[in-house]
Structures are given as structure tokens and as C-alpha cells.
Amino acid sequence: MVSARNERPVVPEGFDASRASYRREHPDDWRFSDSERQAVWRAIDERRDIRKFRPDPLPDGLLARLLNAAHAAPSVGLSQPWRFIVVRDETTRSAMQAMAQRERIEQSKYFEGRSTQFLDLKIEGIREAPLSICVCCDRGDPDVEVLGRHTVRDADIYSTCLAIENFWLAARAEGVGVGWVSFYEPDELSELLGLPEYVVPIAWLCVGYPDERPTRPGLESNGWDRRRDVGELVFHERWGSGEREDLGSALEEESVSFSVSESWCEQLAARVQPGDVTAGITVRDVEDELVKPLGSLGVLEGVVQQWAVATGSAPPTVMKPGVLVFAGDHGVTSRKVSLFEGRVSRQIAVAAARGATAIGVLARAHDAAFSIVDVGLVGERAPGVIDRRVANATSDISRGPAMTHEQVREAVHAGYLEAKAMIDTCDVLIVGEIGIGNTTVAAALLAALTRSLPRDVCGRGTGLDAQGLDRKIAVIEEALRENAPDARDALECLRRVGGFEFAALVGAMFAAGEARRPILLDGFATGVAALVAYRLQPRLRDYFIAGHRSAERAHAMVLDELGLEPLLDLRLRLGEASGAALAFPLLKLAATLHAEMESFDDARVEKARP
């Protein structure tokens, strides 16, 4: 008989009740049942990085369960450093998507011989998924000691990654897709979400029901790489033979935040409507069923989806364009930054209005609504040109601000009103500019917005020689020193080193976004204006379609910043919306392909199959 003093005390609930003798006799008895183990292994084996999502919201309570699964992860010193920011706001997700697409295009340059294959990969579903989660690590006070982190300072980051894996596996078990997006600059994401200095973004997760059910990792099925045999990766006692690959170190860049500095502009930008991502998914569903290999039409498929996001429906096969070109002169032309004198701007505008220049011919060929608008030319009012003149040219940016606060406001509103007047008569807005010296202004504005060096964004314009290019770079350097533009304030950058036609283009883009019309962008100057407009209202990226990549060297940089791929690359340097107008037929042809190709469900196709 066991005495009372030898009886084992009752183990409180939640504590281990097993005995050492039992654990010694049954060391494997802690495992799950066969069916439970099979479910765990299945979740691990079938976890996938999802890129295509359905827009359907997750049921009430499901997200909470997944976050609780993440919160159950182990952490160094029980510090629980993970933090979860649930993002549903369209503007925030638009800004994040733009970052990802910009970095996608930037990274493509480093895959020598494989850049096209890389660009064909779908890397994110930020706007398609019903929600995103930014998983962060709260690193806390570095002077506060955390158990287990004294020698391995990044153990808190590793703990946060374990929480992500918990979330991912639980999501797979629930039939929920997760996509980890890593195409962004951490400082820029921190700025977007207002993270304190001691909080580090670890992952941007797209979360929702998947619109794909891959049986293999996406990069493997797309032929990018293969899963290696685990035997190649396991060593015993010492590091195995062979050299490790040096991936180099990432370049550090300053963070750039986006702001709107004046309430009138903020109110105008707020009228831009968010795109309809669900409509884009619907169009993609149709594209996937057409009689062709998936993704085989490349950029054209993306354009059709982009159109649907902008307008809410697939593009029409009968498509009416509107061509809107703004003309203005620049005081900086007095510094000999162009081969031509400023008065040539007016001559080109008059010729364009009577249909004698490239854009006049192309607008006539497309039966387009067509307007040339004077927002700042020098000289007499031009016949055939709409008069919205703010002033006779901007001030010389190398001597001070290009425009007053009232002038930039007037120019933006002029562009907005002209676009509003045209928008109801067209399905897509083709925008461009006329202005001698505006590649100098565009380069200065781009340098201000991106904190780039003038020599890295300055090109030959209409054909400067080496000495002229050096002079142009020096003038831009003077302009940046004189004006000290703040990259965080896009409107003030526009006022200080921009031009009237740039401001008018911004206003026109606001109007197009308000009316949900796609915007077909022209060359370098138009692209820089689009970058200003995007910084003021990230929703506008839903409406941008890049018509072409011009010969001006920094135009590629602008497209990268916007995360856009051009339809054409013809080495054009003409301006006045001509490159965008040349790309317009591709939009019509893409719409026709989408509307008229048969699908695999079509009876005629079924009959034709062997």
C-alpha cells in the first residue's frame, strides 16, 4: 500500500502529466495518429506560393484563426516579435503594387538572357487578393536583453519567419492561398505603412482564395528552376565541398515618400476612382480559356486585363481615341539647352492643329477627337490651338521656381477641364506634349522626384552634341541647387522645376481617372508627368498604359518607376503623343483577339480537336 506521502500530486490542467517511466518505455508515443500525421505532411507538401486569386472575401472568423496559428509560432525568449498589418485599402495596395512592378522591371535587367522569361512570370496578386498582410518584426529596444538573442541578434527575425510559415500552413489546410511578395524596397514600404524605426517589414502576404491550384512550385512548372534533391543539401559533421555563390550586397537607397502639399490638389486627386480588380480577374479567366497556351500573347494579355481594371469591362473592338496635346514654352531654353529656339514650339503647335505634323496625321488616321492646347506658349495666340495660356513661358528653372503656386494650380485645372471636355467622346485618352526644352525640364523633374544625379537622367533631346549635353547637365545641376526640391512633395517638385504642359498633363490624368478612362502614355516628358500624377494619387496607375519606350535614355527609368512595360520600342524621339498614337492599333487588335478568339469550351473547337 502506497502511503499518502508517496502519492503523486495531481498535475494542473495544461501541464505535462506523463511520467518518466512511461516516456522511457514509449519514446514515440507523442506522435499524432496516422490520419493526423498525413494531414500535416500534406499541408507541408502542398503549400504553394499563390499568384492568382479570386476576389471573394474570407468568411468571418477564418482570418482570425489563421492569425492565431501564426501567433502560436515559437519565438526567441518568448518575445513574440511578430506584428500583422492587415491591408484592405485600395490606395495602399495600389502603391504597393506599383513598387512591386517597378522592382520587377528593375530586376529583369539582371537576368542576362532570361529577362523576357522573367517578365512573363506573374509575381504578385496584390490587387486581386481580397486582402494583404504585412508581417513585421518589432525589434524593440536594442538595450533590453532578450533571452536567447544575445549572440544571435537576428533570432527575432527568424521567429517572425516561423510565424509566417505557421500562417501559410494553416491557410493551406483551410484552402486559402498565400503569396509572399518580396519585390519592394524595405524603407519605401516602411514609409508607406508608417512603421517606426525599430519595426522591420519581413513579408507582404497576399491572402485569399486561390484562382490556381498548382501541383508543383510555380517557378518549377514555368521552367525557371527545379527543386533540388535534399541529398545535395545535407552535410555531415563539416561543411560539404564546393564553393558558395557570392550574391553580392544590395544597394542602399534613400526612402521616398509620397505626399500632396496643397488641399486643392488633394481634392482633385481624390476624385480618381479606384480600378476594378475583379473585372481584371474576369477578363483573365476568359484569356485562360482561349485557344492558345497560357500567357502566350504576353504583354497584350496584360493590356486587356489593365483595360478591364480601369473601365470595369473588356475593351471594345470598336474603340474611339481622344488625343490631347498640351504645349508650353520654358524659360530655361535661354540657356541653350536645345538646338532650337523657344518660338519653334508655337510653330509646331500650329502645324499640329492643322493636321500637318505626325500626331495630326495619326489622329486623322484613327478618326480621333483631337485638341492642341496652349498652356504657356510665347507669342501671339495660335490659330486652331485652344487657348488656356497661363503665362508666356515658365521662368528659368536655373534661376528659381518655374511657376508660382497660382500658376501651377491654374495649369493643372486647365488640363483637367480640357480632358473633361473630351472624355465623354472617347474610350481611351492619348496624351502628349509640345515644348522646346522640355526634355531638360523632364530630366530636372525626374532627378528631383527620384533623387537621381542629373548626368544619370539627362539625354540628347532633339540631337544635342557632346558639348550641348554637358551644358544641359550643368543647367539642371544649377536648377536643383537653386530650387532644392523635396522628393517627398511631388507637387512642389512640379512647381519648382516643371512646366505648364507637365502640370496640365497631371490635371488631364486626374480627369481620366475620375471618368475611368485608360490613359495611353507617350514618351519621356509625358512619362515624367505621369510619375508626378502617380505620386499625387497612386490609384492612377490603374489607368496607365505605356505606348512606347523612346530613345531618350531616362524614359526607361521612368517606366521602371511606374512599373510599366511599353507596347512599342521604336527609338522614337518625336513627342507630341505620336508614339502613343502609333501604339493605339495594338490596343484595338488586343481587344479583337480577346473578343473573337474561340475558347476550348466552344463546340467548334471541341469538334476540331483530334
Image: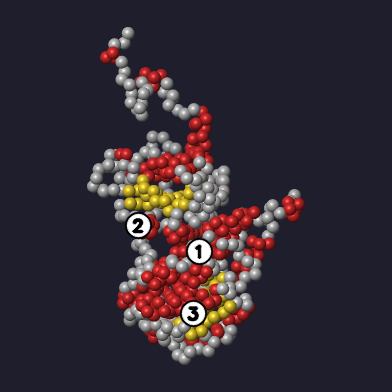
Q: Earlier in the sequence, mark 2 or mark 1?
A: 2
The foreground one among 472 and 180 is 180
Q: Earlier in the sequence, mark 2 or mark 3?
A: 2
Give the residue displayed 45% in from the left and 28% down from the top.
31
Element at label 2: loop
Residue bearing mark 2: 194
Q: Is residue 31 above or below residue 500?
A: above
Q: Is residue 457 above or below residue 47?
A: below
Q: Quadrant of the N terminus?
A: top left
Residue bearing mark 3: 326
Q: Is residue 282 left or right of residue 245?
A: right
Element at label 1: helix
Q: Amino acid at mark 1?
A: Asp
Give the residue displayed 47% in from the left and 64% down from the top.
539
Q: Is residue 117 left or right of residue 13?
A: right
Q: Amino acid at mark 2?
A: Gly
The answer to which image quadrant residue 537 occupies is bottom left
Residue bearing mark 1: 542
The residues tagged by marks 1 and 3 sit, at their Cα atoms, a distance apart of: 22 Å
Q: x, y percentage for residue 419?
A: 51, 75
Q: x, y percentage for residue 275?
A: 51, 62
Element at label 3: strand
Mark seen at residue 63: none
